[in-house]
Amino acid sequence: MASILRFLRPAQAAPDPVDPEAREAELLARARGGDVDAWSQLYREHYDRVFRHLAYLTGDVQAAEDLVQETFASAFVSLKQFEGRSSLTGWLRGIALNLVRHRWRSLRRGDVAMDRLAAGSTELGVGADANPEGAHLRQRRAEVLLKVLETLPPQLREAFVLCDLQDMSAQAAGAELGISPGNVRVRAARARARIRAELVRLGWLEGDDEARDDEA
């Protein structure tokens, strides 16, 4: 992944001695006024973080490359609505997450992310048995898990995708999400508990003691 990212990164601007927050606010003000050069500068400076975030969420470099372009295009169109209550990075990640959510809803058989969902459903014990499962059952399990994932709050879903589907450590996921490793573990655990509870309700897991404990 690292070698691919190196080629996809846009050229970085030279360090600016001006205070970064003040400089970003000035660029945003210019961009809101229609200054394309100012927006291009913001694009170059935030591309890496947004692309990396999308790559982690989708597990697909090509998809992330497409989605990062959509993210910045959507952000530019709605830039005047950004009031600065959150960081620009956080706002861009929110737009990116919505685009990923749409991608999850349109997943089809054979997609890398769907394969990851199917693998994740196996690890959660969804429909697992001693016999090799057929492709249809594997696909169905992935679709069920996808629907359950969409019911989770974004912060829980992100933690689950990064830790359980992308196999990231709590430290790496925390750095990506801008929270502590402890918070990542809490969110991932809550996500797993809610997923298990919903899978029990849907009949894909038995309501055993472990599942009840997780739900509680």
Image: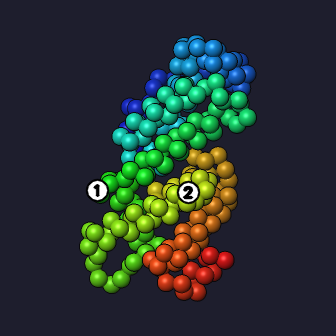
The residue beneath circle 2 is 157
Label annotation for residue 110: 1
**Image: 199 above or below 94:** below
| Residue closest to the eye, 17 or 159 | 159
Query: What is the quadrant of the C terminus in the image?
Result: bottom right
Residue type at mark 2 is: Arg
Dot 2, crowdedness within 10 Å: few (<14), some or many (≥20)? many
**Image: 34 above or below 53:** above
**Element class at badge 2:** helix
The location of residue 92, given as percent across then percent down, is 58, 36
**Image: 1 above or below 12:** below
The location of residue 213, given as percent across then percent down, is 63, 81
**Element class at badge 1:** loop
Residue type at mark 1 is: Gly
The location of residue 39, given as percent across then percent down, is 56, 20
Label annotation for residue 87: none
Query: What is the quadrant of the N terminus in the image?
Result: top left
Q: How far apart are labels 2 and 1 at the CA level?
A: 22 Å
- Dots 2, 1 in contact, CB < 8 A: no
Give the residue displayed 52% in from the left and 37% down from the top: 50
